[in-house]
Amino acid sequence: MERRRARSRAAWRRRRLVLILMSPWLVGFSVFFGYPLVMSAYLSLNHYDLLSAPRWVGLANYRYLFSVDPQTWTAVRNTLWMIGVLVPLQVLSAFGLALMLARARAGVGIFRTIFYLPALAPPVAATLGFVFILNPATGPVNTILSHLGISGPLWFQDPSWSKPSLVMLGIWGVGNTMIIFLAAVLDVPRTLYESAQLDGAGPLQRMRYVTLPSISPVLLFAAVLGVIQGLQYFTQAYVAAGVAAGQASQAADVTAASLGYPLDSTLMYPVLLYQHGFTDFQMGYASAMAMFLFVVSFAVTLTIVLNSRRWVHEAGR
Amino acid sequence: MKRVAMAVALLAVALTAVGVASGAARHRSSPTKLTVWVGWSARELSAFKQLAAEYQKANPGVALNVVGSINDNKIVAAIRAGTAPDVVSSFNSYDVGIYCGTGGWIDLTSLMKGSGISTSMFPATTNYYTQYGGKKCALPLLADTYGLYYNKALFKKAGIAGPPKTIAQLTADAKKLTVRNPDGSLKQVGIDPFIGFYENVPERWILPWGGTYTDSKGKAHLASDSAWGKWLTWQKQLIDWYGYDNLVKFQAGLGDEFSASNAFEVGKVAMNLDGEWRVAFIKAEHPTLDYGTAPMPAANPSLYGSGYINGTIIGIPKNGKHTPQAWNFVKWVTTNTHALAEFSNAIKNVPSTTASTHSKELIPDAHFATFLKIFANPKSGTSPIMASGASYTNLVQNFVTKWQAGQVKNLPGGLSTLDKQLDAQVSQAKGGGVP
Amino acid sequence: MSAAEAAVAPLVRRRPPARVRRKRLLVAVANHSVLVAAALAFLLPFLFITLTALMSNEQALSNHLWPHPFAWHNFHDVFTMPGAHLLRWMANTFEYSVLATLGVVLSSVPVAYALSRLRWRGRDVAFMVVLIALMLPPQVTVVPLYVMWAKFHPFGFNFIGTLWPVIIPNWFGDAFSIFLLRQFFLTIPEEYMDAARVDGCGELRILVTVVSRLAKPAIAAVALFSFLYTFNDFFLPLLYSGESPHHWVLSIGLSEFRSLHQVQWNLTMAATLLVMAPVILLFFLAQRAFVEGVTLTGVKG
């Protein structure tokens, strides 16, 4: 009898301890995540501009989002494009650089620092720098190209080149991922390579059967991180569009018409959400956009979480 | 330890003494502190601050705190978040539909009646863009008119006698005044019709063509109003003559609009659509520039002499704390003839009351006189005031930028889709959802 | 030779034939040249930014590549330019980063501990929820959060226009830090904890004394990343303090450098360098912590 009471008292004490330790997160999650999520769903069914009370409109916001707003599908396409192009290129370049660093022996430290430094640059600073450097008329890049006889493209002023310019900016900052790949590549035991070599495997086969499987968890991690960041991609697109539009029009105050400059080519979904919610103050409509983003991100997240173990296991053997 | 305690005690006494003294001083005379938000900055802001100082001297019970560089985004954000100032002013009237419609700026009708101010004191166009839905939530504070600036020196060099009056003359002069580099890029441009460049927005260019946005019922009719098709076709032809990429590259290398390297002021652009305030900028930055001002060339001879009008508007945000004092200042700065004339001289904007346009205090200026005439022209017009505020005009601008880039293959079809989108946007702003 | 001796006899490495040696040398040279080319490409933007920062305004607006003369005073003019308040922005940014980082560390460590070293019902579900919260874009909750802060006026205080809405949530746990710390805590052998328990330590004391000391590299990494992330943060500060320049952080101030009356690209580039400087300096001072921290995230992640 005593033991049972002592055990239940101990269990109660442990539960209290867990509660105390988890309390910051529990409060934070409810207040800053759970409640807003529910409110988002509610607001998406209303018309709300923060000046008067929310007015019920049912599914009208969603109807406007999917069939009337001329910019919705452009924004979705742009975000998907960025994810589809930037993430693989970032993973490839990080992996490639890491491989070369792992193979080199002289001056590795210097090279590693050089490749890592751009990742430290604050995104806004890096974006400003790139937009200036890639100014089609007076920027250093086009100036040098013209000395070489090549007429450089209009970079951030050209709708076909603006996203590739953003991709270049993204690859420049790939240092973090590169370090992770470097550690993983260096971690692969030499014995694996040696036994593969003894079995007659050439360099390409060694890559395919030894390197790639061994670093597959890191590959997955980099890809997942890339996709998550792609779904939130805001700062670089917003700043680049604003600055590039300012360059073309040279107007002192840049209006909302510059978001996505040029010609909506850099209009990402989070940027459009920001415009509708915090420039036009259509908060109900922005909440509908947010719910759509939530559904898509949740689906992606669930897929990753449920399959990650399987993907890594299959490759890692 | 004892010494430390003594020092702390002395410090405490000293601080309390200072606190009591300043508190007493504060209680003796506490003027009402009003925060005034304006869009001006630098030179123009100093001019407004001088005006504010004059008001304070005449009204010692009020202390004005003037904040410059305000734009509509800031105003909208502040009103929504409840952090709006006592008096607020905006450079343009685009968001009046939102301000008046939602009550973000209070209705001034009763205040005006109480002070004996009537709308007849202001010119008709300024009345149009300071009210919406029957609520007058703003008053005009000096107005802006737009016309053609042309570089007389470049005109002489190209052998052109005077400024163009028709579209055909404008096109011919623009081509004559354009100089290209040996590699084909642009060195000097006659006139830049690119929407998005400097002051080029659709609503300012469509006026010389006689176009309007909405029909009598308030529905968008860009597809059926032939002026739009004519203007857009002309504009794209001229842009293609320059070469779209050439023009974009040329613009990327130009100086900032409000700097001393302004493209017109340094002679890179021979003609430019600009506002009347440019006269003051040129006087301050390039006093030796040989230039002239004229109304914009018109498609229809009867329209020549008119122009686009807009202007700074001023109002009182809701949830303000010192409405009577705020109204006194607003009333003074918008109707006092001396104040308006003085301010107009300083920043070279058009005076916004009928009385002040005839004030003897106005310094005559040949360049500026053009704009006073345009302001008085009965055919001059302004942007539509819609419930969706500035997003209305942004949607049109987005369409035109796509059109000038050659991304719209079927112009009539594109315009009628645009009409539907504009109407849907208005009804969404009113809170009715999709029609 | 007996079997044992044969087993321990050293492996004699024969010199590989000249053909193989030449091939290996070529590969190494090729590898090195590509590295050099890539390094130049990565350095070039920094070079251009620096050169522009040392030009006069007219030169920056033209296609000159080299400053004539070197305008070192630009780095001073950046602070005195009207409308530019670099020092205030730097102060705001540091205030935000320091307070947020402190909050993240203090609130995430206990949560990570509870999720890794204590057994309780619902623990795995809670961890799954943390993971999901980690992966969802902030835009999903940003609208109602803004409304919440806009309508909350305790004692007449306005949160909108300040950085508090951005700082405060960090004191309630940060999903990424919790995740990282939990992964690390899982690797601590139970013996350390058992030894402390035998000594009579309560769970909380174990956390504070034993675990925190053992997990110092992970906590340092979390603090570093938190600091970096908040130092570079743009979206949330833009949302809440975007319309009140007094509370701008460096990233917003830098992006608005251009629209203040006039764009001076030479000064903007100089300001860009100055904004990059603290982070790069921090890197050189704490290089090992950086690399270890980044590796930790990837390997344990």
Image (cartoon, helix red, strand yellow):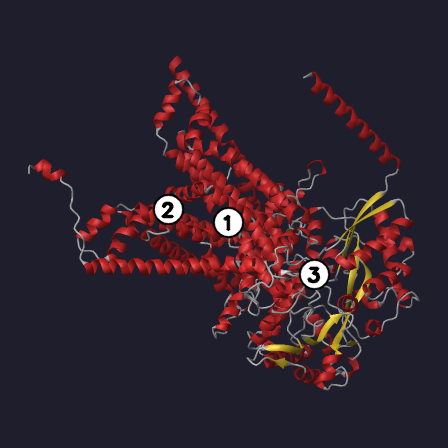
- Give the spatial CA distance, label 3 vs label 2: 47 Å
Decide: marks 2, 1 in contact (CB < 8 A)?
no
Q: Which residue is mark 2?
A: A306
From the viewer's perspective, tell me whether residue A313 is left or right of residue B218.
left
From the viewer's perspective, tell me whether residue B250 is left or right of residue B151.
left
Q: Chain of mark 2?
A: A
From the viewer's perspective, tell me whether residue A139 is left or right of residue C130.
right
What residue type is disc 2 on?
Leu
Q: Chain of mark 1?
A: C
Instruction: Report helix, strand or loop for mark 1.
Output: loop
Nearer to the camera, B379 or A64:
B379
Instruction: Report helix, strand or loop for mark 3.
Output: loop
Q: Position of residue B373 (x, y in %)?
A: 84, 74
Rate crowding at label 1 as few (under 14), some (14 to 19) or many (20 or more) other CA atoms within 10 Å: many
Q: Which residue is mark 3?
A: B389
Against A120, is B396 above or below?
below
- Give the spatial CA distance, label 3 vs label 1: 30 Å
Q: Which residue is mark 1?
A: C137
- Give the spatial CA distance, label 2 vs label 1: 19 Å
Q: Residue at x 43, y 61 (%)?
A: A85
Q: Work out which quarter of the rendered image holds the C terminus of chain B and state it.
A: bottom right
- Asked if residue A52 can be seen in this view, the reply is no
Rate crowding at label 3 as few (under 14), some (14 to 19) or many (20 or more) other CA atoms within 10 Å: many
What residue type is disc 1 on?
Pro
Decide: marks 3, 1 in contact (CB < 8 A)?
no
Q: In the displayed image of the protein, which residue is found farthest to the right? A: B360
